[in-house]
Image: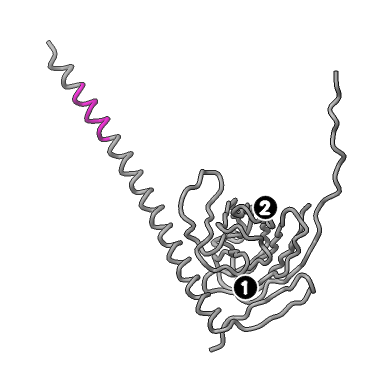
Amino acid sequence: MSNPMIRIHDISTDTITDREMTDEEFAQYEANQAAETARKVATVEAEAAAVVAAEAAKQQAFNDAVAAAVAAALAAQQTP
Amino acid sequence: MALTQVPAVQAGGMTLLSTTTLSGASVSLTSIPSAYVHLQLIIRNYLPANNDRTMSMQFNSDTNTRYRWQVSGANAQGSFSNSSIQVYPDTNGTVASGISTVNIFNYTNTTTWKTVDVFGITNWPSTNTELYAKTLTGAYNQTSAISSIQLLADSSTTFTSGTVLLYGVK
């Protein structure tokens, strides 16, 4: 199977060259693509985890507020 | 009261250095002249061979993790963990009506890291009549002057079509 093509535009001469990647360039290209994909996945997962954590914190804060309000109401009822 | 001397207006503006049709897996713009203060890339109608793909950029054929980019609008702190800078929003693989403007500041100085800002709009990958816009900030942690730019099609795709214009800004 052939390697991907690349285009090189030399601005000083306005010359455009299309050629196949060398094996070395292709290996580097694949390594970079894999690393960038892994970083994207990690970023998406981190963002999703942050959303879950934020929702959990919000829920916990709500639960704490309800518990505090109930406790306050009970304390008020027990006061002679 | 003394009048302040106002400097004369300097000649300047933008010079179109190259126009290149996007093709293959990457496009390199080489032998960039050093006679300008800034560079600006205008990327038009990027159509990838697959849906939901971005485009990224490297300098001087440097493929190492010496880059960092993030969505603009927040302070950024962290390592240079990217091997390129994203320069186009995730785009549709069928319809291409987008445009991205990429500013590369003070590209010939040899004493600072290099900085980039990006504003791009394109066709939303899921619904190509809807807008997807992104503003990005990028950095490259090398002090060498920039003499070439590599534009890379996103993972597992190639450029179907599109055009990139490079301007020198004085």
The secondary element bearing badge 2 is classed as strand
Residue A36, placed above or below residue B113? below
- Left or right: B38, with B127 as reference point: right
Q: Residue furthest top?
A: A80
Q: Residue at x 53, y 89 (%)?
A: A1
Residue B119, placed above or below residue B5? below
The residue that mark 1 highlights is: B26
Measured as percent of width and height from the top left, residue B6 is found at 85, 33
Alpha-carbon neighbours of circle 2 within 10 Å: few (<14), some, or many (≥20)? some
Residue B108, placed above or below residue B23? above
Measured as percent of width and height from the top left, residue B66 is found at 52, 61
**Front-most of B58 and B10?**
B10
Q: Nearer the viewer, mark 1 or mark 2?
A: 2
The secondary element bearing badge 1 is classed as strand
Alpha-carbon neighbours of circle 1 within 10 Å: few (<14), some, or many (≥20)? many
Measured as percent of width and height from the top left, residue A60 is found at 27, 38
Q: Residue at x 78, y 52 (%)?
A: B170
Main SS class of the magenta portion in the image = helix
Quadrant in which residue B34 is drawn: bottom right
The residue that mark 2 highlights is: B105
Q: Residue at x 47, y 73 (%)?
A: A31
**Residues shaded magenta:** A63-72
Question: Which three-letter amino acid code belongs to the residue tagged 2?
Answer: Phe
Distance from the alpha carbon under mark 1 to that under mark 2: 22 Å
Quadrant in which residue B154 is drawn: bottom right
- Tell me, yes or no, whether the highlighted magenta stretch contains residue B157: no
